[in-house]
Image (cartoon, grey):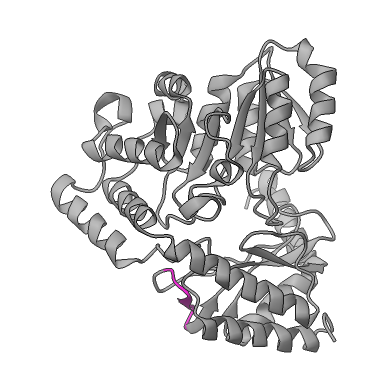
Amino acid sequence: MTEKLAWVSEEIQALKEAGLYNNIRTLDSPQGAWLDIEGQHVLNFSSNNYLGLANHPRLVEAAHKALDQFGVGPGAVRTIAGTMRLHTELDRRMARFKGVDSAITFQSGFTANLGVIPALVGKGDAIFSDELNHASIIDGSRLSGAKILRFKHADAEDLGRVLDEQRADFRRALVVTDGVFSMDGDIAPLDEIYQRSNRADAILMVDDAHGEGVLGKGGRGIVDQFGLHGKVDVEVGTFSKAFGVMGGVVAGNDKIVEWLHQRGRPFLFSSAMTVPDVAACLAAIDLLEESTELVDRLWANTELFKREMKSLGFDTGKSVTPITPVMLGEAKVAQQFSRELFEEGVFAMPLGFPTVPRGAARLRVMISAAHSSSDLEQGLQAFADVGRKLGVIS
């Protein structure tokens, strides 16, 4: 390595010494309740596969059929020659599923945020953003050139204060929040945020990545949970979590969606979602519209696991969703706990700074409808054994 890049090696070494280096595991099996990882068969507590759809037979079959009919890739951006019938069908079906005017799909949830925020606000405008919003919201906000004003996490009263103090100084205003916060598993008080946003004549946007397929009737998301249909201007989501596939979506006001067809840069300048992804997403919507069984099972598993973890003495933070943080404090402790669990046949990845604040390292357990009762019992026993061995619980 040349001298000009020596700092990279130094920074990597510093990460390792601080227990913050990310060791990436390689999977040798489909996603599911159990995974084959580097020669070991382990219980999976790390994936966002909330409903177990990532390897569901109907999604796999739908992808195969689409491949036979349409081939693999779209071969172009949506605005030139890349819009296939399946793309417009997915847009239409997602709008119906979410109960909104219209929807537009992107390549991922991350690119959806990068597309929608700069299209709605720019220089001379302001973004009022929850201080714990996802990195994609932060990056999209920076790209917009708008002034970024943060309010206290999940605090509608503080949002109201900042709006009262600052709103009049800007042409347009966008209030943006995650629906479910991915590190802590808590939920934005969206009804109260709507009231403050509406009073200030601000566009309201919620990123429902961890809420779709989880919250609301049959997994229709946080807007449905709060009964705010027609009041939230923009819902951003992803197909890579509960839907088990890949891709992003912006749903809401039909004029905003029409504008994104003209000015959403990832939509305009990057090729469309691949054919098998789109077909699999459509199959996932079919399953969710047919029955609430998977969503109900997800919540039953969540309640069981959280109840038993708390009875063992673990701190699971303030989560009210299937995201279950196991708070451990220091990054080195979290990494050691994860390694010990892996030896016990349980895969639960540690999270430390900068993903979470310093001193708030944790394991983030992701519960799924794919887990059986015996899976959860086995996982709980492993947590109990490792927790006592490391002195985390008594």
Residue 275 part of the magenta segment: no
Q: Which residue reaches farthest front?
A: 227
- Location of residue 132 by image quarter: top right
Range shown magenta: 31-39
Q: Residue at x 60, y 85 (%)?
A: 377
- Location of residue 288 by image quarter: bottom left
* x then y, percent, for residue 343: 62, 86
Q: Which one is nearer the viewer's eye here, 8 or 64?
A: 64
* x then y, percent, for residue 280: 31, 53
- Location of residue 15 by image quarter: bottom right
Residue 36 part of the magenta segment: yes
Can residue 189 be seen here? The reply is yes
Residue 201 higher or lower than 108, as above or below: above
Q: Is residue 229 left or right of residue 226?
A: left
In the rendered view of the protein, which quadrant contains the C terminus?
Answer: bottom right
Q: Is residue 208 left or right of residue 80?
A: right
* x then y, percent, for residue 362: 74, 66
Q: Residue at x 41, y 19 (%)?
A: 262
Q: Residue at x 42, y 37 (%)?
A: 106
Residue 163 higher or lower than 73, as above or below: above
Q: Which one is nearer the viewer's eye here, 53 or 291?
A: 291
Q: Residue at x 64, y 53 (%)?
A: 182
* x then y, percent, for residue 209: 54, 47
Residue 61 higher or lower than 97, as above or below: below
